[in-house]
Image: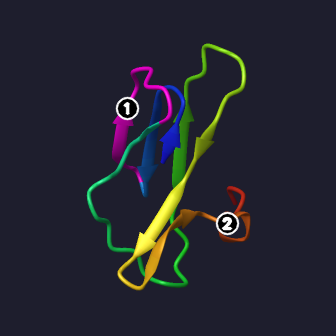
Amino acid sequence: MIADEGARLWIDGNLVIDARKDASGEKRESPPIELVAGRKYDLKLEYHESQEKARIQLLWSSPSTSRDVVPHSRLYPNQ
């Protein structure tokens, strides 16, 4: 993810990025995580913003796909 301030990301209940400190535009990477195509994963993203114009991007990549923003079509509301 790329965030202009602090953020934390969990995947299926496992904290994979813990970057609570302010860090302007810093990219934070989790260790490699094996995901299965077609399977839905529980994501939880906490984001801290203390100034105007909040910005955060969630990115993904694979051996066959370059790093890109996770499209909205791949995110689902909590059911």
Name the residue at 32% across, 66% down. Answer: 33
Q: Position of residue 8 (x, y in %)?
A: 44, 37
Establish if 24 lies above or below 2. Answer: above
**What residue is pinned by disc 2?**
71
Q: Which residues are magenta?
A: 13-25
Magenta span includes 6 = no
**What residue is pinned by disc 1?**
19
The residues bearing labels 1 and 2 have C-alpha atoms spaced at a distance of 23 Å
Name the residue at 32% across, 52% down. Answer: 30
Q: Disc 1 marks which amino acid?
A: Ala
Q: Position of residue 50 (x, y in %)?
A: 60, 14
Q: Disc 2 marks which amino acid?
A: Pro
Res. 27 mark: none
Q: Position of residue 23 (x, y in %)?
A: 43, 25
- Closer to the camera in the image, 25 or 61: 25
Color scheme of the displayed model: rainbow
3 sits to left or right of 76 = left
Pointer 1 or 2: first along the chain: 1
Magenta span includes 19 = yes
Q: Position of residue 78 (x, y in %)?
A: 68, 56
